[in-house]
Amino acid sequence: MQSNPIQQRIELICEKWEDAKIYKDARIVRIKCQADEEEMVDTFYTYMIGVDTPISDIAFHFESPCMDVKQFGILLLKELEEIMEIWNKSVKDERIDYVPVHWQPDYSLQKDKNPAAMFVDNFNMLAKELNLPEGLFAVAIFKGALRNKNLVSWLQEAIKLRISAKVKFLIHDTLTDLRFANIASSSPQTIVTIPLNLNMAKAMEQVAAMGDPKDPATSYRQIFMKMINAMGAQKESEAEKWGQECIAIATSNLSKDPYWIMQIVVVNIALGNDKIRYKKKKETLEYANKAVETSIASKEYFENDVASGLLAQSLMFRGTVFFTQGNGNDAYSDFNTAFETYLKQGNILLAIEASRMAGQSAFKASQKPKGIKILAEGARLAKNCDPETARGSTYFGLLELLLQTDYMNFISPQELDGIARNIYGPDWRNIVINWKKVPDKNGLPQREQEPVNA
């Protein structure tokens, strides 16, 4: 039986966890991972709360972001209270040996000025209630917390407290954003670090190679991952070599399955994107043109919206290439066609983005009326989607562009005000001006928030 490279890496993290938690004085375990390993770390967090896993510690996921150090503990306790209620009241899997947990959070424990005290004291009491055997711990996984300065400050306060010997806090850092490096180095006894080196690029190649060796899709997936990994390693010639092999496999199998043409488009766009990195304008445009030409040819193979969707995707890429190379006229033409295609398909979110880019391209080409017109058309699209969906799109950017123009001949201020109010509320103009700020949980920008990667 072929081994699973993903499962192997999860088991490796499990082994490292078991090694790390034996440090008696350590109360916080910090995983230090590569940027491309973060998804595996998240998978490990889920694995920790599974039924059939070798990990017997009792782990709790916390999704609350630490936006306010003083309020963070309350949010954590509310999450914990919900978890306990679910555990005590839900129908259990027959494999679970159910024991009710008689614990309730005590919100009065904030008896000093330390903002972490309430949660730490409560979690200590929960660990005592769980009465776990020697070598097992109650684990608080700060799974959803933004790695920002507020969380660092909160953890610094937590370290000052008496965290139970039966408790572990679990956090992770990425090498590209080492938020916890300073507190880890300043508190080496309290914080133990697990360094990961999972070689995810190799893992993805191994996963891609799994399957029937006689199936061309198996060899295609393996070579495709080689191309992606070469791009990530900035090996231009290797990426091109593997990309051309992908195209050759897809082309040779096109007569058997028309969906291979989609892979030809995908690879051409990927190779074009890679050429942008090396500022090779001619080669970038050549791959963009090939993607568009292939998408047009796909109409011979499909009778549904697949071909038009593929073409719109290719035009969006080529339009971006034209735009970045200073060709506003051709960029506008591509984005405008993509906009019309997405409208016909009823894909409102992508139509909004195509409208935004078409408007910006028209302005670059000194064709302001065309730009305002298509932006106004894009602005009206928000009538056809719910506010939350609109807030999750690039509608902020579309309105920002439109507000910088004399748009009244294309959409009335009253109509625009009505649409925007429905999405962002009465202060929508101020919100649009600040749309590039980090959004709150409702998708609205906040002026004072720290950027995630600041």
Image (spheres, rainbow, N blue to C red):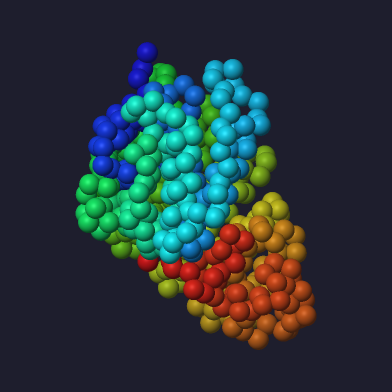
The residue sitting at 58% across, 28% down in the picture is 100
369 vs 27: above or below: below
Hey, which quadrant is residue 209 in on the image? top left
195 vs 366: above or below: above
The quadrant of the picture occupied by the N terminus is top left
The residue sitting at 71% across, 53% down in the picture is 346
Q: Nearer the viewer, residue 167 or 449?
A: 167
9 vs 32: above or below: above
The residue sitting at 37% across, 29% down in the picture is 136
Q: Residue furthest top?
A: 1
Whole-percent x and y of residue 380? 72, 68
The quadrant of the picture occupied by the C terminus is bottom left
Q: Nearer the viewer, residue 121 or 234?
A: 121
Tag count in the figure? 0
* Side of 70 relative to 376 (left or right): left
Q: Is residue 35 visible?
A: no
Q: Residue furthest bottom?
A: 406
Whole-percent x and y of residue 10? 36, 30
Hey, which quadrant is residue 279 in on the image? bottom left
Whole-percent x and y of residue 194? 27, 41
Whole-percent x and y of residue 370? 63, 76
Q: Nearer the viewer, residue 182 or 257?
A: 182
The residue sitting at 56% across, 25% down in the picture is 99
Q: Nearer the viewer, residue 356 or 54?
A: 54
Q: Is residue 150 visible?
A: yes
* Side of 105 relative to 164 (left or right): right
